[in-house]
Each structure stands twice: as C-alpha cells, then as structure tokens.
Image (cartoon, rainbow, N blue to C red):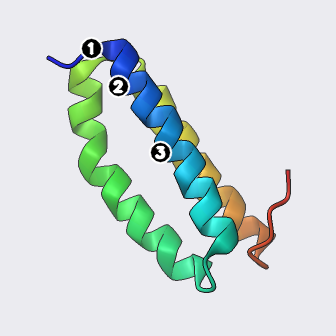
C-alpha cells in the first residue's frame, strides 16, 4: 500500500491543479465534468488506501462545484 503522507501530498497537488485548470480553461464546464468523472473513478481506491482521503475528495468535488457557481471561469478566492 502506498504511503498515506505521499498520497495526501498527491491529493493536495491534484486540488491545486483542478483549481488552476478550471480558472484557466475556456470551457470550464466541460473540464469540470471530466474532472468529476476522474474523481469518481479514483475515489474508491483512495478510500481503500486511507479513510481520511474521503474528505480530501469531497474537497476536490467542492472545488469543482464552486467553479460552477462562479460561472465566469475567473478565480474568486
């Protein structure tokens, strides 16, 4: 099994990449759908590796949904 700290770092990196892609991508709606599909496929594996990753994935999905609410694709922190 992979090291939980390593996986946690990967998850944080993924969240950052998702945020950057959504803010930069001209068709953020399509990108969000792709990222959500990826997240749904990867989530069970991460949950098996370490239970706390469930929350991490919920944060990734929350990031995706925030982008939808903004609507214009700009970065609003």
Name the spot of residue 23 as percent of width and height, x first. Answer: 69, 67
Mark 3 or mark 2: which comes first in sequence? 2
Residue at mark 2: 7
Residue drawn where x is 35% and y is 20% of the image: 6
Q: Which mark is residue 58?
A: none
Name the spot of residue 43 as percent of width and height, x first. Answer: 31, 40
- How crowded pointer 3 is (Cα within 10 Å; few <14, some 14-19, many 20+) is rated as some
Residue sitting nearer the eye, 20 or 42 = 20
Name the spot of residue 51 as percent of width and height, x first. Answer: 34, 17
Helix, strand or loop at label 1? It is loop
Residue drawn where x is 27% and y is 14% of the image: 3
Residue at mark 1: 3
Helix, strand or loop at label 2? It is helix
Residue at the left extreme? 1
Residue drawn where x is 45% and y is 26% of the image: 9
Alpha carbon distance from label 1 to label 3? 17 Å
């Amino acid at each position: 099994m992979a090291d939980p700290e390593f996986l946690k770092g990967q998850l944080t990196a993924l969240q950052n990449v998702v945020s950057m892609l959504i803010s930069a991508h001209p068709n953020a709606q399509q990108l969000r759908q792709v990222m959500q599909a990826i997240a749904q496929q990867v989530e069970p594996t991460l949950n098996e590796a370490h239970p706390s990753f469930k929350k991490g994935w919920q944060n990734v999905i929350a990031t995706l949904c925030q982008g939808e609410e903004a609507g214009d694709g700009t970065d609003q922190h």
